[in-house]
Image (cartoon, grey):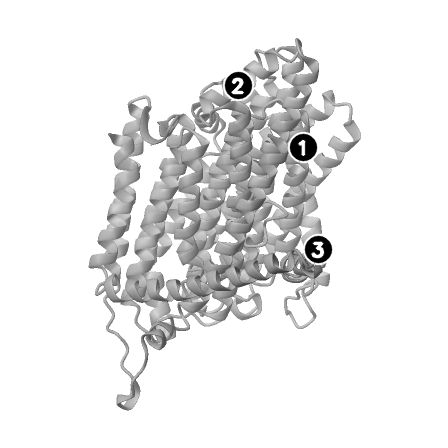
Amino acid sequence: MLIALEIVLPFAAALAIRAAGKRNGRFGAYAGALTAAVLAALQLALIAGGGAELKVPFLEGLPLTFKAGGFSCAMGLIAAALWTAALIYSPAYFKAEEEREGESGGVKLASYYAFFTATLGAVEGVMLSGDFLTAFIFFEILSFTSFTWVIFERTSAARRAAETYLFTAVIGGLLLLTGLVLLYFQAGTLSFEGLAAFRSELINGGASGAASFGEATRNLLVSGLFILFGFGAKAGMYPLHIWLPKAHPISPSPASALLSGVLTKIGIFGILMESVYVMRGNAAFGAVVLVLGLITMLLGAVLALSSVHVKRTLACSSMSQIGFIITGIGTYVLQSAAGSAADAAAESEAAGAALAGTLLHMVNHSFCKSALFLLAGYVLMKAGRLKFNEVKGCLAGNCVLMAAFAVCALSMAGFTGLGGFVSKTLLHEGLSSLAAGSGAAALIKAAECVFILSGALTLAYMTKLFICLFIPENARAKGSCVPLTVTLTIAALSLVPIVMGVPSIALRAAAFMMGSSAITEAAVFTGESLLSAAITLGIGAAVYALFVRHFMISKEKKYLNLWPKNADLEERVYRPLLLKVLPAAGCALARPLAENWALKPLCRGLVFAGKFLGRCLDTGTDALIALIRRTVLKERPLKAPHGAEITRRETFLRVADDAVRPVLMNFSFALIVTLVGVAAIIALIVFLV
């Protein structure tokens, strides 16, 4: 019953918040925080009780399975704790925004808090899922509810970022669905335990039928790659990272904190479950994950270093830290392959180190980046802006926030004695051990260099941001007074990296999440690990002193953005491909068919049917939105000016105003992409199954 309450309570609370919070915006924050605190208590009860399991009938042979274990309970507890902190922080943030913008947002905030709380329910649903079907359903719910965070401001920039976010979510969902369908046809199940048994049978039966084993392995790799990119879209993994640098800066700071601290971990959760239960020991899959992790890690660090916007810097930093985590997963898969080659029943110690480092870095990044995004909100409350050249010195003299920032920044850079040092040491140990036993030693050594360079760039861009905010030559005048709860929330989150910097505590936490205790404290504080950390920090300091100060800061003390303005993967590749190349290719392929006298009537019929379907969707969407606004939002129907008569169609169009129509257009576009994707899935299944 505790698991059922974990799932149902947030959605019920969201409905109550939306119904009762229209006139009092703070009610949603308090109710949401109370709900998150209750969920945290329920997670603690599940941990104390040793876990639980719940199955809900859904499809024949495919029930919705919820299972509370070490890792799922720990991540669910972290999510509930961060949600509580963000909701406690929110009233002061939105009050400052209301004073700055000069407009009230009762209904707007009620909807925001309702979706905010519902997203927590979706997160808990994914974290407690015991199979990929359950995870997929709540994964899609999560994409819809969190979409409202990105479009909250309703500006043109917010709509553009929300369109990118929704497009990436739809593409990721389609890729994930494709992979799950293919995986189900191969394994006959989507439960994590069933997939682990299927993997064991596949490996044990490989010696008896080499040809069938090779074919089954290749098919499993295909489905695994679809699932990887499906979850990777939410995690911010290259090349589906395009939403992350755009959505974070435009979202409210409490939402940005959870987008980075929790929602990206939902994608990591899926990749981790896939790697542990299905693809463990698959060297080809591990190599792909490792390469993508390294690219994500380095590209995010370079983007963060070149940024001159506080929240964009933190967003690109999140991309880089996600790259570290994905690199750890790839290392774990490759180390498992090396271990299974020697003994199919035991994994190598290095694989355990890589997995422990991955889990600990997830925890470290969740708290550090949440604290830093809330600190960015503090900057916005004080200065009203977020560009480097406009906020210089706005936090000078605030010793509490200075210490909190320094702890989180140094932890992510891998400074000795903090949580990031423990996690990165374990990640580096797994990577270096792979180099020692791998035939491609030169390639793995290059990966180690990328690992160290990315850590060094982390220190460089965090130093750049720290000096901009706290140590300018001439501090700006202080802005409005910020409540003490904001400072205390940020300070409380920054304590976690300090606690997780104690090896005994960190490794016990990793052992609890892994369900084993294969890592010893001796693996952390070694001469090699201390030397590696010193080299990384030294390179980072040199990058800042020799490059940032001389090339990224002008003589007039202005911060410069050296990243090319036209170097946008979405604008330069994805949009032209989708809007120009693919339609042109389709027209070229369809022209011979349309000119054929026998097929011409069929083509015209398809065009007519498409137009008719589009008109029905357009009118139906307008009618649905009008109904929602009349019933759920309880808005009065529009009246015609000066007594003029207007048709029902015109009423619908006026109801779908500038704040709603872009959303409808995005959903219509998403629906079209979904239909095309479903057709592609069917075609793929026909050819591969």
Please tell me which of labels 2 and 1 falls first in the chain: 2
Please state which of the two labelled residues, at mark 3 or mark 1, is closer to the viewer: 3
Return the residue at label 3: 589
Residue 398: image tag: none
Work out whether residue 196 can be spotted.
yes
Q: Amino acid at mark 2?
A: Phe
Q: Position of residue 509 (x, y in %)?
A: 44, 27
Please tell me which of labels 3 and 1 falls first in the chain: 1
- Mark 2 crowdedness (10 Å alpha carbons): few <14, some 14-19, many ≥20: some
Q: Position of residue 8 (x, y in %)?
A: 27, 40
Q: Quadrant of residue 66?
A: top left
Residue at position x 55%, y 19% from top?
199
The CA distance from mark 3 to mark 1 is: 60 Å
Secondary structure category for the residue under label 3: helix
Q: Amino acid at mark 3?
A: Leu
Return the residue at label 2: 198
Q: Nearer the viewer, residue 191 or 119?
A: 191
Work out whether residue 399 can be spotted.
no
- Mark 1 crowdedness (10 Å alpha carbons): few <14, some 14-19, many ≥20: few
Q: Amino acid at mark 1?
A: Leu
306 to 285, vertically: above or below: below
The CA distance from mark 2 to mark 3 is: 42 Å
Secondary structure category for the residue under label 1: helix
Q: Position of residue 366 (x, y in %)?
A: 46, 42
Q: Nearer the viewer, residue 495 or 288?
A: 288
Please tell me which of labels 2 and 3 falls first in the chain: 2
Q: Quadrant of residue 135?
A: top left
Q: 467 left or right of 448?
A: left
Residue at position x 67%, y 62% from top?
580
The CA distance from mark 2 to mark 1 is: 43 Å
